[in-house]
Image: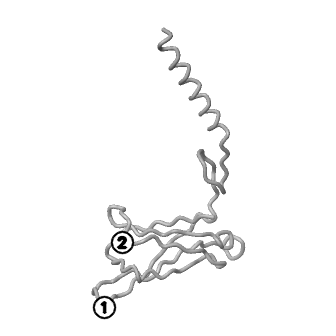
Amino acid sequence: MKKYLIPVVAGMAVFGSVTAFAATLNVTSSSLGSGNASVAACNSDAGVSYTGGFAATPHVYQVATTTVTTPGPVGPAVAVCAGKTYKVTFLDLSNAQVGSEVTGTIGTDGTDTTSVASQGIAASAVANVAVVITG
């Protein structure tokens, strides 16, 4: 009986201390940690678009630029996302990443356009686009 009692007591002590440490974690919308917190969106209508251009050397249309927009009425609604950073990821039909992630900062007008022509992403390979705005 004592043979089984010691591991059980030790396990309870370890579990109790881990639980106590986890209970002391604080999470806010501006920090990263374990737990959850509601994070308000700067603009629920944010979107991303891209343009294409013909590349003569590989003879295909490629993604030329990407634009992140945070539309809203003129005034404070547009400025809410200004200065926040974004990440854009191009995805193929199986949602696998195509090319490198595009990053930038939203301007005071609520938009930002970034050139991605150097990546050589074939426009035909892009089926979906994902955008995350942080900050």
Cβ–Cβ below 8 Å for labels 2 and 1? no
Q: Quadrant of residue 46?
A: bottom right
Q: Residue at x 29, y 84 (%)?
A: 60
The disc label shown at residue 72, or none: none
Residue 132 locus on image (x, y percent): 53, 64
Distance Cα–Cα, label 2 vs label 1: 19 Å
Q: Which mark is residue 126?
A: 2
What residue lies at 48% left-to-right and 69% top-to-bottom?
Answer: 88
Image x and y of residue 113, in percent: 53, 80
Q: Is residue 91 left or right of residue 66?
A: left
Query: Is residue 117 positioned above or below 40 on the image?
Result: below
Amino acid, disc 2: Val
Most extreme residue toward the bottom is 56
- At mark 2, the secondary structure is loop
Q: Is residue 54 left or right of residue 13?
A: left
The residue positioned 48% from the left and 14% from the top of the image is: 4
In the image: residue 33, left or right of residue 123: right
Q: How is the image coloured?
A: one colour
Q: Position of residue 99 (x, y in %)?
A: 38, 72
- Please give the residue where the numbered disc 1 appears in the rendered image: 56
